[in-house]
Image (tube, rainbow, N blue to C red):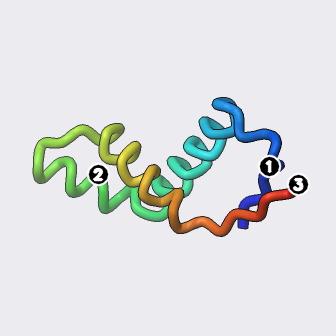
Amino acid sequence: MIYLNFTDLSQEAQNRLLETSKEDVKRKFGDSIRKYVKENYGCFETMIEEEALRNLYSYTYVFNI
């Protein structure tokens, strides 16, 4: 669960959430993404960014007002 202050939805807060999601994706799926990128000649950082954006939808958010 991610707790957010409803009044703090600034660009910095959004970037912090994205960085958290990237680290989560790297921890969970880093090895399989590296293998996929190696086999299909892709870019690891691009794949991590895309998966991190998708991963944001799997979080449960609690907004404090």
Q: In the shown orientation, is residue 43 left or right of residue 41?
A: right
How many neighbours does mark 1 have within 10 angstroms: few (below 14), some (14-19), or many (20 or more)?
few
Instruction: In the rendered structure, find residue 34 and report the number of the disc placed on it.
Output: 2
Q: Which mark is residue 27?
A: none
Q: Position of residue 6 (x, y in %)?
A: 80, 49
Q: Secondary structure at mark 2?
A: helix
Q: Pointers 2 and 1 in contact (CB under 8 A)?
A: no
What amino acid is at disc 1?
A: Phe
On screen, 62 above or below 12? below
Which image quarter is the N terminus in? bottom right
To which quarter of the image does residue 33 belong? bottom left
Where is mark 1, residue-wise?
A: 6
Q: Which residue: 31% across, 39% down?
A: 46
Residues at marks 1 and 3, CA–CA distance in whole angstroms: 5 Å
- Disc 1 on helix, strand or loop? loop
Residue marked by disc 3: 65
Q: Earlier in the sequence, mark 2 or mark 1?
A: 1
